[in-house]
Image: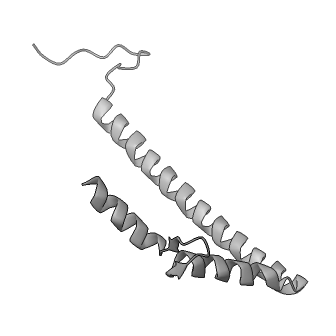
Amino acid sequence: MGVVPHNPGVEPEDINTGTLFSVIAVSSVIIIILVAIGFNLSMKKFKDISLEMTEMTGYPDLHETQMMGEAKMNRYEAQEDGTYRIPIERAMEMEAQEAQ
């Protein structure tokens, strides 16, 4: 065959789909990265504002409650009803071993 003649006033119809899909893939990755960065920045800003408002209002119970909750999740303790509380990490390890 030879070279396809070009008709004046008519655009050629050959589209390079590989390039098109590459542009779409790169654009999608960039958008996903930007959304993830925006989400992380907004969560950090929310935490900063929450801490600032807690300090401004003098609401000391929030920090104390969070610390007590964290302590309960990370220590061994005997309960009054004869049961025991163990750290959550240890409980997950035991469940995983039992499942195997």
Is 28 rendered above or below residue 53?
Answer: above
Tell me the residue at 32%/38% (across/down): 19
Vertical placement of residue 31 versus 20, above or below: below
Q: Quadrant of the C terminus?
A: bottom left
Left or right: residue 57 versus residue 86 is right
Q: Position of residue 20 (x, y in %)?
A: 37, 35
Q: Quadrant of residue 24?
A: top left
Residue at the right extreme, as displayed: 57
Which image quarter is the N terminus in?
Answer: top left
What residue sits 72% from the left and 69% below the top?
46
Q: Nearer the viewer, residue 60 or 37?
A: 60
- Count the labels in the image: 0
In the displayed structure, would residue 24 be above or below residue 32? above
Quadrant in the rendering for residue 89:
bottom left
Q: How far from the left and from the top, in percent, is residue 15?
A: 33, 26
- Residue at (55%, 63%) from the top-left corner? 37
**In the figure, is residue 6 to the left or right of 83?**
left
Residue situated in front as seen by the camera: 79 or 34: 79
Q: Nearer the viewer, residue 34 or 84?
A: 84
Q: What colour scheme governs how the chains and residues are painted in the rendered image of this protein?
A: one colour
Residue placed farthest to the left in the image?
Answer: 1
Residue at the image position 29 percent from the left and 53 percent from the top: 99
- Camera-side residue of 29 and 83: 83
| Residue 97 percent location from the top left of the image | 28, 61
Residue 73: which quarter of the image? bottom right
